[in-house]
């Protein structure tokens, strides 16, 4: 009965509410066929803009949409009245009808709404083009063949517009190049212009009908110039030129647009030779640079001779030859200002050092530091050492080199190689073979050789250098070990105490008889029992810690005691002898103890 009452209470508390929407336009007229959504319930408004929903939820997520109108979205809290009436207003989406007018008959319109990335491309044929846009802000690019692109930002609202768009069509482009020649003249070319010698530091001034149009410097390549078709006068400006005119030139873009202006040369001649002490240097590039940074170059022949014609002025002379530079006293500004003169010039050089880079390693490729290296070049000898990583480097004159490397503990090594001028000999790897020695001995427990035991040879840092196994006679050997290093031997056997030898240095001579005695983990004591007259007490019963032992014919008794035993009690009943012995003072294992029994 209690369960039925509880169910009744739950059902009674679930309340359903009615929501009615009336949807109208901005002119307050009802809108039909509007898609309305409340909490994922979807319905369509009738001819009066009316739509109704039933819901039990406290929060109402409402959206309404209709073609040509802006979608509306809102969230409300349910008032929990039995019926809630809401009126919603929808706004129309505005458009603009825009007509563009151009000064050209064809081209391309590209546009995108600001905030988006994709452009829409619309070609136009004729001087006008009309497009309908949604209200908003747009970026446009207007262009036509051979024109510059016109970029604009335009904003449209609910209206019609007529816009004039300017598209810049450039003038005809002509390409002009100067040429140093014996004769003055103008030539027009379509493609191949042949060989030319461009002038330096000359300016071309262009006039039309006596009116100045433009001026520019002639360069090593064609200079593009915008000109209308017509008749022009050209004038050359330069230090050694005056009143050099080309008059009445007919420029026609329909013919050939490549124009070469030939100008008579004004030059001076420099002749010279390049030397390094008594050696003549051929194949060297000589560069002459004027105050305006114009450069001219020539090459020396096999005899070191060169010759060049230059515009008369001051020049800085530089040399480009691998392995050689001009001497400091010839890094000057030379005055070759007299026209049609012949100057003689001797350029003296010095030879640059070349570089050697290498590495010293052992036969396993491990770098060797602090190795002594000698580099011999003729009568000159350079001494250096390898660094912590085995690397070395030095500079020396080119030629045939002898390189010798030495290091204690290794066999010396020498190599002969050739070092070219103004170069680097890198990646030179020198491998040294170490001197090797052996270490051997016998391992035992004082009485018995110990076979089949593992022994390790370690360096000063405790790193294992070599391992070996003793044979049945206890003999062991470490072979082919590098000399001039410090080592120690370690042995770890479960039944014996761990063994470490003293540190020793290995030289060229083998270390033999490096014998090892292992101590057992138990304390071993050799008791010798003598009478007061020093005669052995043979076959005598001895009680040690309650255990009865018997001496041998020589009065000896071997005891094996726990490793942590500090003292023992000994009794010889037949002599009435009793004594406690302190074991902590014993320094060897086994230890021998003699007792005089009275």
Image: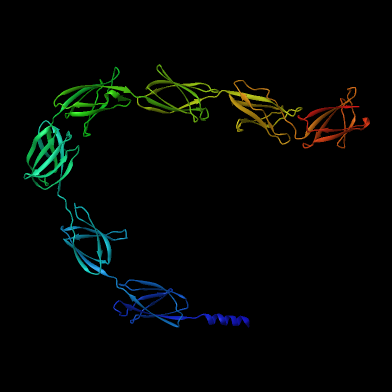
User: In front: 125, or 494?
Assistant: 494
Q: How is the image coloured?
A: rainbow
Residue shown at 74% from the left, 29% from the top: 445
User: In front: 33, or 295?
Assistant: 295
x, y percent for residue 531: 90, 25
Left or right: 211, with 175 as reference point: left
Above or below, comparing residue 116 to residue 496 in the picture: below
Looking at the rendering, which quadrant does residue 232 occupy?
top left
Quadrant in which the C terminus is drawn: top right
Quadrant in which the N terminus is drawn: bottom right
Residue shown at 20% from the left, 52% from the top: 148
x, y percent for residue 541: 90, 31
Left or right: 499, with 565 as reference point: left
User: In front: 295, or 54?
Assistant: 295
Above or below, comparing residue 345 to residue 121 in the picture: above
Count of numbered tags: 0
x, y percent for residue 261: 12, 37
Left or right: 168, with 137 as reference point: left
Left or right: 285, with 62 as reference point: left
User: In front: 504, or 424?
Assistant: 504
Looking at the rendering, which quadrant does residue 198 occupy?
top left
Residue shown at 30% from the left, 25% from the top: 325
x, y percent for residue 18: 44, 81
Above or below, comparing residue 87 to residue 165 in the picture: below
């Amino acid at each position: 009965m209690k369960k039925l009452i509880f169910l009744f209470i739950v059902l009674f508390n679930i309340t359903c509410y009615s929501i009615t929407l009336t949807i109208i336009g901005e002119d307050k007229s009802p809108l039909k066929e509007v898609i309305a959504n409340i909490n994922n319930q979807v319905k369509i408004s009738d001819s009066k803009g009316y739509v109704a929903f039933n819901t039990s939820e406290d929060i109402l997520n409402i959206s309404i949409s209709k073609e040509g109108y802006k979608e509306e979205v809102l969230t409300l809290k349910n008032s929990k009245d039995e019926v809630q009436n809401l009126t919603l207003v929808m706004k129309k989406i505005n458009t603009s009808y825009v007509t563009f007018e151009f000064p050209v008959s064809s081209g391309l319109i590209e546009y995108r709404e600001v905030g988006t990335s994709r452009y829409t491309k619309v070609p136009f044929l004729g001087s006008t083009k009309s497009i309908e846009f949604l209200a908003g802000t747009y970026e446009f690019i207007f262009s036509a063949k051979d024109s510059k692109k016109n970029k604009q930002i335009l904003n449209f609202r609910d209206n019609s517009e007529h816009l004039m768009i300017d598209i810049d069509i450039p003038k005809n482009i002509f390409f002009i190049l100067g040429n140093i020649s014996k004769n003055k003249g103008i030539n027009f070319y379509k493609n191949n212009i042949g060989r030319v010698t461009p002038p330096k530091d000359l300016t071309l001034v262009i006039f039309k009908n006596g009116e100045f149009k433009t001026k520019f410097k002639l360069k090593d390549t064609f200079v593009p110039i915008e000109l209308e078709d017509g008749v022009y006068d050209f004038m050359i400006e330069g230090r050694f030129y005056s009143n050099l005119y080309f008059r009445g030139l007919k420029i026609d873009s329909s013919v050939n647009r490549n124009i070469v202006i030939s100008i008579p040369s004004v030059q001076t001649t420099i002749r010279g030779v390049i030397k390094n002490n008594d050696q003549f240097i051929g194949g060297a590039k000589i560069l002459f640079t004027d105050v305006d940074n114009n450069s001219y170059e020539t090459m020396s022949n096999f005899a070191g001779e060169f010759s060049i014609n230059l515009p008369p002025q001051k020049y800085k002379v530089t040399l480009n030859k691998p392995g050689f530079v001009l001497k400091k006293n010839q890094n000057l500004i030379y005055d070759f200002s007299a026209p049609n003169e012949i100057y003689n010039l001797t350029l003296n050089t010095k030879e640059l050092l070349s570089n050697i880079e290498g590495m010293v390693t052992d036969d396993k490729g491990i770098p060797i530091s602090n190795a002594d290296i000698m580099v011999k070049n003729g009568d000159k000898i350079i001494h250096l050492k390898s660094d912590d990583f085995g690397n070395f480097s030095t500079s020396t004159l080119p030629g045939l080199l002898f390189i010798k490397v030495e290091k204690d503990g290794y066999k010396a090594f020498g190599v002969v190689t050739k070092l070219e001028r103004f170069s680097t000999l890198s990646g030179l790897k020198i491998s040294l073979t170490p001197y090797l020695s052996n270490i051997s001995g016998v391992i035992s427990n004082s009485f018995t050789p110990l076979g089949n035991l593992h022994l390790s040879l370690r360096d000063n840092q405790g790193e294992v250098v070599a391992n070996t196994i003793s044979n049945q006679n206890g003999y062991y050997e470490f072979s082919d070990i590098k000399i001039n290093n410090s080592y120690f031997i370690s042995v770890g056997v479960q039944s014996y105490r761990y063994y470490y030898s003293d540190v020793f240095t290995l030289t060229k001579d083998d270390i033999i008889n490096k014998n090892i005695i292992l101590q057992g983990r138990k304390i071993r004591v050799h008791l010798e029992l003598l009478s007061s007259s020093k005669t052995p007490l043979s076959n005598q019963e001895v009680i040690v810690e309650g255990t009865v032992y018997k001496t041998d014919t020589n009065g000896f008794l071997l005891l094996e005691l726990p490793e942590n035993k500090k003292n023992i009690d000994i009794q010889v009943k037949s002599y009435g002898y009793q004594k406690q012995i302190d074991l902590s003072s014993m320094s060897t294992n086994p230890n021998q103890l003699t007792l005089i029994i009275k």
